[in-house]
Amino acid sequence: MLVGLNPLIAQNNSTQKPNILLLCIDDLRPELNGFGKDYIHSPHIDNLAKGGVMFTRHYVNAPSCGPSRYTLLTGKYGPSTNDALFKRAAQLKDENPEVSSMPGFFKSQGYTTIAIGKVSHHPGGLGGPDWNDPAQVEMPGAWSRQLIPTGEWQHPRGIMHGLAHGEIREKASEMDVYQSATGNDSIYPDGLIASEAVTQLKNLKNQKEPFFMAVGLLKPHLPFGAPKKYYDLNADANLPHVKNPQKPEGRTTWHEFSEFRQYNLWGKDPVTDPSFATEVRKHYAACVSYADAQVGKILEALKESGLDQNTIVVLWGDHGWHLGEHGVWGKHTLFEEALHSPLIVKYPGVLAAGIKTEALVESIDLFPTLCQLTNLSIPQFAQGHSFYSILSKPKKKGHPAIAYFNGNLSLRTEEYRLIIHKDGFKELYAMNSPEEESKNRAADKPETVEKMTGMIKKRMKDLNPDY
């Protein structure tokens, strides 16, 4: 239902509802020029940032692909497992799925909804042994069409961790943790995903109905494989020192980063081998540059079609990734590095182009924001806070950000991060201090712990009366 003319979009003078292009990047840290980091080559994302609004303190709701995407796509907090959307699908059998997710809602409002690549947890959005069983749908009723080019990788499961020329992960221990093969962009799966997105944009050029198109790129997810030309762009990068590289003392959300260690590491360990750690970081950078190039192709196709004049573009990282901070090489902590990711929003007639906002926002907030940007009423099931007003007034404050994983909860405020373990143990960090998350201050600041604990409980109670 239309709720009146949106002043942010009005100057576009279009009678059609704005389109939405959502770019989902896997495991992307906010190490980009637009976010103040200049050592990774990412010109296309940087250019998007110059034309949009950058949220420098955007936090995901879970430090893992499946639950983070669940929150983004449903607008609701949910389980912290990678099969969260499949569990939800099983519960929706007797309900109308078109009013219970972000793409489903936009579809019910007249949008053509298209998913390409890894948008939900499984590329292509299906289950089964090879993730291609049409009887097992991750998001029933959400998409008008869901596309996943598999090429040499045979099936969606194959492209998820695919390396060059169709190499599929069967045993992770037999797959190199990083690789840079010579060839064009399509020797890795993201090249095919970007090409399909370009094709879809060309086909949408003359469509009368608005579209909601989500494109999910796999890199820089493990294993860190990208065409060699992208490694070469970063081979001489002057990487900064890793902050707080030691394993924290005492009890924390630190873990053994088994996802990384399961790959072939050639007998090396980035914790104890600085040169190997540097190589890992440079291959991660290569994967970011490779993903950036695919973003560039998609945005160029959007511009060539003329659709950019009436399209909201969102670039979203599904979570962060430790590159040695706290002695971790991976995600799955509730520390800053795993929960902090890039968010860029560009809309037609953007009023604050190139502006950075330090307002605290969560991924769950994107759904209600897009509703307001497209002049649609926010559905009652959406649990986030719209940051619509921050787009034109970037100095406005946001709100504390909640995250969760494995039964543990976290709350990030302007000054502190509180982590509550499922057995009640607490970590409190002063985020504006030099120590940041390397010194637990819970014992020193019991009043702060009590106040923030109350904030988390109230928020969760408001959302779930049975909490």
Image (cartoon, helix red, strand yellow):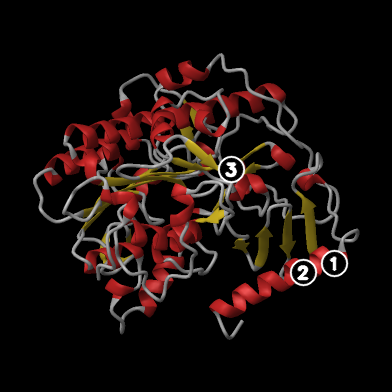
| Circle 1: element type | helix
Query: Residue 304: percent from the left, percent from the top?
Result: 18, 31
Q: Which amino acid is tagged 3?
A: Trp
Q: Considering only order in the chain, which callout, 3 or 1, is on the residue closer to the N terminus?
A: 3
Label for residue 451? 2
> Circle 1 sits on which residue?
447
Q: CA distance from mark 3 to mark 2?
A: 29 Å
Q: Is residue 192 left or right of residue 87?
A: left
Q: Is residue 109 visible?
A: yes
| Circle 3: element type | loop
Q: Is residue 101 left or right of residue 200?
A: right
Q: Which amino acid is tagged 1?
A: Glu
- Pointers 3 and 2 in contact (CB under 8 A)? no
> Circle 3 sits on which residue?
321
Q: Mark 1 or mark 3, which is nearer to you? A: 1
Q: CA distance from mark 1 to mark 3?
A: 31 Å
In the rendered view, would you say 170 is above or below 235? below
In the rendered view, would you say 380 is above or below 404? below
Q: Nearer the viewer, residue 274 or 360?
A: 360
Q: Which amino acid is tagged 2?
A: Lys
Q: Is residue 180 left or right of residue 258?
A: left
- Pointers 1 and 2 in contact (CB under 8 A)? yes
Query: Residue 368: percent from the left, percent from the top?
Result: 41, 63
Q: Mark 3 or mark 2, which is nearer to you? A: 2
Residue at 53% x, 49% y is 319
Q: Is residue 302 left or right of residue 120?
A: left
Query: Residue 152: percent from the left, percent from the top?
Result: 27, 37
Residue at 68% x, 56% y is 413
In the rendered view, would you say 410 is above or below 379? above
Q: CA distance from mark 1 to mark 2?
A: 6 Å
